[in-house]
Amino acid sequence: MAAPRTVPIANRALLADDIPQPAGWESVAEILTRCKTSLINDWLVRTKKTPELCDLHLSDDQRTGHLPKLIDDLVLRLDRPKLPDKDGDAIASPAAIEHGKLRRRQDYSSAMLIHESRILQVTIFGTLHENLSTLDFNLLLPDVMIIADEVDAQLTQTIGSFSNAAPKSAKAHLVKPKG
């Protein structure tokens, strides 16, 4: 009887069990905290290259002002010790609510908010990819699930406040009650 044939795994370097973990491994939350400034800059570059978001002329601060707090909220959620198992696991985010109101005043559309959120997720995952050499792979998949859930929850809160805010053009027609 012939010996069974073995087939090598194409990319063994990506298997977490095969990578010994030295003391210098970082959690996703630690990487996002350490890389917050570069993540925001990367998001801004991607946003400026997105045709759907370039129609409005905003300063860099007007585009990114909400991101530090949203990232802080995400890191806070990542530091909680459990996987998302219900919709109520999301953190209430005043920053996301204010972001929706601000974007309404800046004449964004709901589609533009969705583009921003998608770009945020892509940028976060890109940041993690750039830090694979220090990433703790034992926590990666649960943290990716939490990131997706939290960014979606923030988008939901943003869209909710965006939808409830009076549009910029309508505010000009509001009459202040006498009192």
Image (spheres, rainbow, N blue to C red):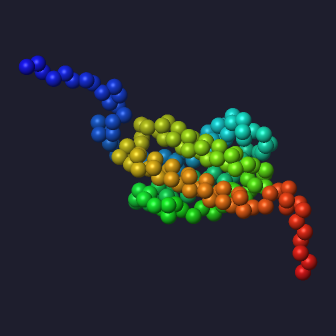
Q: Quarter-wise, where is residue 159 in the image?
A: bottom right
User: Total number of numbered labels?
Assistant: 0
Q: Is residue 158 left or right of residue 29?
A: right
- Asked if residue 124 lies left or right of residue 11, the reply is right
Task: Give how far across and how far down residue 16 sits, in percent.
Answer: 33, 39
Image point 45% across, 49% down: which residue? 145
Q: Does 17 sit above or below residue 92?
A: above
Residue 58 left/right relative to 2: right
Residue at far left of view: 1
Whether residue 95 appears in this view of the structure is no
Residue at figure coordinates x 67%, y 39% from the top left: 47
- Relative to 27, residue 89 above or below: below
The residue sitting at 48% across, 41% down in the picture is 128
Q: Quadrant of residue 19?
A: top left
Q: Nearer the viewer, residue 37 or 46?
A: 46
Who's the residue at 75% across and 61% down the image?
A: 165
